Image: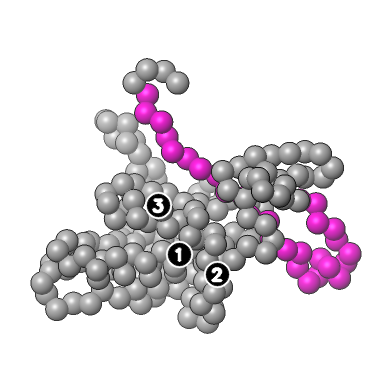
Amino acid sequence: MESGMEEIPVKVAVRIRPLLSKEVLHNHQVCVRVVPNTQQIIIGKDRVFTFDFVFGKNSTQEEVYAVCIKPLLLSLTEGYNATVFAYGQTGSGKTYTIGGGHIASVAEDEKGIIPRAIQELFQHISENCNIDFDVKVSYIEVYKEELRDLLELETSVKELHIREDEKGNTGRISALKFSVLGFSVPKLFLPSPERAYSLVILGK
């Protein structure tokens, strides 16, 4: 690392999902194994890969959230930036891990990262009444190198662009932002995650 360069704290986790019922029915075999007491997996016979975190097929939603997301959310409330994204082929379990399906109908232990993060964020807000918070939500989909604003109600496709400013900072333009909560304590207002949930559902 060159002198003066700041380390970027990026961590990568891998989660192995169990075989689906139809895969078991067609006699498919598990091709990924977790090396016990390590953060490594084996693909095939001998291809070993190391990650920051490894979650086996019996891992829970709570476990993934507590290990990977909770520390980031705590840092977020202290003023640091945080980004989480799921990457994988179709059917690998991204939607389940991130969202856990339709929020209103999913059992508590099956809820994914987004509903858990919303709940904990608003819980933190309610416990820090001496701080003003302004929570905003954007819902963007990247598909085939195109950006779509999922909260744009007028049309199913909203052209978005990513631009770099004179300081080298990148950001999107034209995306809608919904104010979820903006209040100044000591107003008698109890922050609730329900409004944020409704926007997540709207984006689906």
The image position of residue 7, as x and y in percent, is: 41, 31
In the image, is 101 to the left or to the right of 139? right
Q: Which of marks 3 and 1 is nearer the N terminus?
A: 3
Question: Does 59 lie within the magenta span?
Answer: no
Picture disc at residue 100: 2
Q: Can residue 148 be seen in this view?
A: no
Span shown in magenta = 5-32
Name the residue tied to disc 3.
72
* Residue farthest to the right, as pictured: 27
Q: What residue type is labelled 1?
A: Ile
Separation of marks 3 and 2 at Cα, in angstroms: 20 Å
**Magenta region includes residue 19:** yes
Left/right placement of residue 180 relative to residue 154 reads: left
Q: For the stretch drawn in magenta, what is the main secondary structure?
A: loop
Q: Which residue is labeled 1 in the image?
A: 114
Q: In which quarter of the image is residue 117?
A: bottom left
